[in-house]
Image: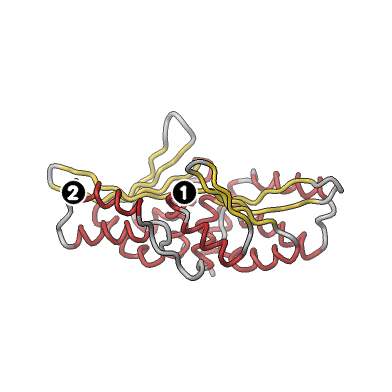
Amino acid sequence: MLSDKYIAGFFDADGCISVNWTHSGPRMVIVFTQETSRDYILTEIASVFHGTLHRKSNRPITELHIYGKHALGCAQRLKQHLVIKKQYMESVLDMFLSKTIREDGIKELLKQLRIQPSPQPNFPSRKWLAGFTDGDGCFTGKVRKNGSFGPCYKVSSSLHDRVAIDTIYKIFGGSVSVRGRIIQYTLYLSESKAEEFIEYFGKHLVLKRTQADYILQCARQGLYKSGSIMKERLKELKSEAKSVQQHRLSEVAAE
């Protein structure tokens, strides 16, 4: 079973919380989103929080919706592990539990939190970083002029949600760039940096575990010089069979 920290990281990357106003009153809704080809990760989260999968008919996207009391339970479990959406989750949850929630109150809360985002934690937890990476991060790279491979880790988010990127940058270094309303983090994975970074959280990855493991293996064995081979192999791993990653879920359950 996936840990709450991992799911919180995945939620910070690809999740949202909203309120439906029904004839019987407000109802909390928590939504996770993922490409349909990888929505088995949502199936695993659904088994934890009793959600329902909705596959889009016009695009390859699947959403996991968690409603009502199950959404409240999910919020209570994840709130302490969140980074980007921590304050918003806690505030909406407090409104529900105190029965003071109003439609105009939610809109005003969101406006305030956009101006004053969540405080930056001292460091990202290992499982949170794995979930966040499986949601929004990627391992990529390019072949240099000398034929060697230069792998890197990248993640982008809205400028308003930069607290996660700033936290990762504070611990591991790298570079941060801003273009319009988007902030991007890049960490070039030299042999030593690959060991430092991937060893920190790599074993908790699900969707991108094989990519991280491959880069780490090449770093340890001095294989960066085989640039074209590494590039092609990394490309293959990104499109690997669904069954391989589903097997990883069973490994996570045993950890």
Amino acid type at circle 2 is Pro
Camera-side mark, 2 or 1: 1
Q: Nearer the viewer, residue 253 or 188?
A: 188
Q: Secondary structure at mark 2?
A: strand
- The residue that disc 2 covers is 26
Q: Residues within 10 Å of mark 2 (few under 14, many from 20)?
A: some
Residue indicated by mark 1:
159
Please state the horizontal and vertical placement of residue 233, each as a whole percent of the image.
74, 48
Residue 13, placed above or below residue 167: above
Helix, strand or loop at label 1? It is helix
Residue occupying the point 74% across, 60% down: 190
Q: Which of the two residues, 221 or 41, is positioned nearer the viewer here?
A: 221
Give, as a three-letter code, the residue at label 1. Leu
Above or below, 199 against 207 in this view is below
**Color scheme of the displayed model:** secondary structure
Picture mark count: 2
